[in-house]
Amino acid sequence: MIATTSRPDAVASSAGRALLPALLARPYPAVMGVLNITPDSFSDGGAFIAPEDALAQARRMVTEGADIIDIGAESTRPYGSRPVTAEEELRRLQPVFAEAVALGLPVSIDSMKSSVVAWALDQGATIANDVWGLQRDSGMAKLLAERNVPVVLMHNRDSADAAIDIMKDIADYFARSLEIAAKAGIARENIVLDPGIGFGKTPEQSMTALARLGELCALGQPVLVGASRKRFISTVTPSEPSQRLGGSIAAHLVAVRNGAKIIRAHDVAETVQALRVAAAIEDLQ
C-alpha cells in the first residue's frame, strides 16, 4: 500500500498552470537540475542515495541558479539499470521530497509510474517527467489530466536500432503520445517534448536528434533536451561521465540554437553560466 499525504489539487494545479509560461517567457532557457536518488544511475549513481547528501545537492542547485529540480528514484539508464517497485521508489523519495519542495524551486518528479507521480504531486511537485511519454503506465495520462500540471513526454525505445530513421521514429512516437494526451484531456499547453538523448538510440542517432531538433520544435510544443554527460560525447572524445562537462555544454548550446527551451543538466552552475552568456551575446547581434 502506497501512503499519500493530501495536498489541495486546486493549489497544485494552479501553480502548475502558471509555471510553464513563466519559464518559457524568459530570454534564456530554463535549467532543470538532475537529482538522482539511486544507487545505479549512469553518471552519479549512489552519490545522493543518503537523504542528507540528496538535500545538500538540492540546496546546491538552488544556489547555482537552477530553475527546476528534477528528482528521480529509479535509474532509467539504457544499459544495466534494474527496475524497482513503486514501494522502493517511495522509500527513497520519502526522506527527501517534502524538504526539497520546501526549498522553493519548482520540483519535477521523474518517474514512469503513475502511483509514484500521484504521491509526488501530493507532496508539492508541480511537473511530471515521464520517460515513456504516457505509453507505459495506462493510468499516467488520466492522472495528469486530472491534476492539470505540466508533463515532459520523452521519446524512448527498448533498444537502439541503427537501421531506422530516428527522426521519423521520434515523430511517430510523439504523435502517439500526443494522441494519448488529447484523449485523456491533458491540455496541450501543459506538454513539453523531450527527444530522449541517449535512450534507445545509437550515439550517432542522439547527435542527429540534436542537429535536427528544429523538426521537433516544429510540432508546436516546447522542447526539453538532456544531453548532460551522455555516452555519445565519449564517442567523439573518449571520456568518463564525470569528464564530459565540455561536451555537455557544447551539446546544450547547439540544442538551444536549434530551439530547445529547457535544458536538463547535472552541472547546474556551469550550464546556467554558459546559457546566459550565450543569450547575452546573441542579444547584441
Image (cartoon, rainbow, N blue to C red):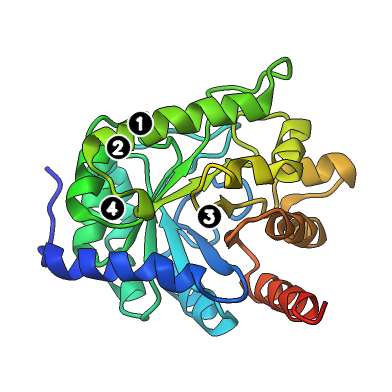
Q: Position of residue 134 (x, y in %)?
A: 35, 35
Label placed on residue 182: 2
Residue position marked by numbered label 3 in the rendering: 46
Q: Which residue type does callout 1 highlight? A: Glu
Q: Mark 1: which secondary structure? A: helix
Q: Nearer the viewer, residue 45 or 20?
A: 20
CA separation, marks 4 and 1? 33 Å
Give the mark nearest the N terminus, 4 or 3.
Answer: 3
State how far apart marks 2 and 3 are (Cα): 38 Å
Q: For the residues labelled 1 and 2, say whether their Cβ atoms are less than 8 Å apart.
A: yes
Real-space Cα distance between discs 1 and 2?
5 Å
Residue that protrudes farthest toward the top in the picture: 163
**Residue at mark 4 to residue at mark 3: CA–CA distance:** 15 Å
- SS of the residue under disc 4: helix
Sequence-earlier tag: 2 or 4 = 4
Within 10 Å of the Cα at label 2, are there few (<14), some (14-19), or many (20+) other Cα atoms? some
* Classed neighbour count for the residue bearing mark 3: other residues with Cα under 10 Å, few (<14), some (14–19), many (≥20): some
**Residues at badges 2 and 3 in contact (C-beta under 8 Å)?**
no
Q: In the image, 235: left or right of 113?
A: right
